[in-house]
Amino acid sequence: MNMPTPTRDGRWLALTVLCLGVLMIVLDTTIVNVALPSIRADLGFSEATLAWVVNAYVLTYGGFLLLGGRLGDLFGHRKLFLLGLVAFTAASLACGMAASREWLVIARGIQGLGGAVVTAVALSLIMDLFAEPSERAKAMGVYGFVCAGGGSVGVLLGGRLVSTLSWHWVFLVNLPIGLAVFVASLRLLPAVHGSSDVRQLDVGGALAVTAALILAVYAIVDGNQAGWLSARTLGMLAEAVALFVLFVFIETRVRAPLVPLKLFRLRNLAIANVVGVLWAGAMFAWFFLSALYLQLVLGYGPMEVGLAFLPGNLVMAACSLGLSARIVMRFGIRRPLAGGLLVAAIGLALFARAPADGHFLVDVLPGMVLLGLGAGIAFNPVLLAAMNDVAPRDAGLASGIVNTAFMMGGALGLAVLASLAAARTGTALDAGLAQAAALNAGYRAAFLAGTGFAVLAALLGGLLLRPRPSMVAAEATPAH
């Protein structure tokens, strides 16, 4: 029997539950990085195989976002959220109990699958719960707050758990969170049937696009080690492209496609996903390379790096929670998105001029704060642009698409900009520069390219997005 839709107040409790589930996924993306040296020493990973503790998660997470979102549309967003939650929590227990390399890598793959499903349907559930534009903007702001703040919490919590207990606890900490979210979800989330008109799963399309995404992600994460022009990397990318072509062919032939291609005629959805790819490419690379800049050039320790990121993440979280929703209701989607990305681009440009003997207050903090401010303002409009014009029956799919865009953009941007940094560093070393100065030259080149990504994303969003009628009408309503 279906539960009724939550009351007005109950919807905000339901949102809290959803955000706790998403927080668990966000935490896992950063908390594990702190534990990698301990995992390597305890389980006997080599330098090359240790990457699979991260890659196994990334592969299944990126590969199953689309399918997870569509399954939510077919069989119910709440049901898939609970299934993904169970898979992620059970896999976290398996990771925490892992006694061998193989066991941990397999469990991490299952974690990625569960995380993909939870992430893909969480946005859809928020859209189900909040239909009125101003409340939806506020709810998306809370969601953005969790996504923004979770990364810093993961770094700090991971360092604390590893130093005081053991690496096992970076996974076991998910158990009480997962159990609490599961119990609360049963009481607070609406149990509605799938909203899709057709209950038939496009198996051929699902297999083709999932395999294509997994191959593409694998080629990207493996590209720096195997070589971007190696036969292995180019071969996998070619296979991924061939599978994408097969997927499009299947979607044009089946009665109930996994991804109705007409969705991409929705201008805001298409533009928001292109913007998401560019922006995620810049931001993922900045997070990774700025951490290396702080450690390898300025000599910061792991905990100091976590604290250095804290001001920017706090600004981002604060903007997502309060300011972004008010700006969206006052100015619509397009101007806040473009303005936020331009502010973030200025922050990246400041990092592109940071010297090898930089100081935190002068050369790090201003860029961090501007990136936090810009990202905090822009995150909400990007999600709203992608989701607002989509019919309820396709909400899970649209959520899967936008999350896939962020995932693929982040992975590709990190790979490309890290390779650019490495190439520039090599040239600087050949020219006789010291190690720290050469590394800094590489990071500055990558930050400058990331600035270009962010500026291009701002221009595309500002010039091509179309205001939605409800948002235009909302502009006349003062924010409270």
Image (cartoon, rainbow, N blue to C red):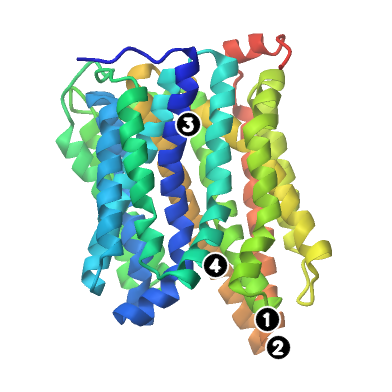
Q: Are marks 2 and 1 in contact (CB under 8 Å)?
A: yes
Mark 3 falls on what kind of element?
helix
**Residue ID for mark 4:** 418
Tell me where residue 301 appears, x and y as whole percent: 63, 75
Q: Which residue is at a point 24% across and 15% down the rendered structure image?
A: 2
| Mark 3: amino acid | Thr
Q: Nearer the viewer, residue 91 or 52?
A: 91
Residue at which label 2 appears:
434
Find the residue positioned furthest to the right: 362
- Callout 2 environment at 10 Å: few (<14), some (14 to 19), or many (20+)? few
Badge 1 amino acid? Ala
Few, some or many residues within 10 Å of mark 3 (<14, 14–19, 20+): many
Q: Nearer the viewer, residue 130 or 331?
A: 130
Q: Is residue 147 above or below residue 156?
A: above
* Callout 4 amino acid: Ala
Q: What residue is disc 1 on?
A: 438
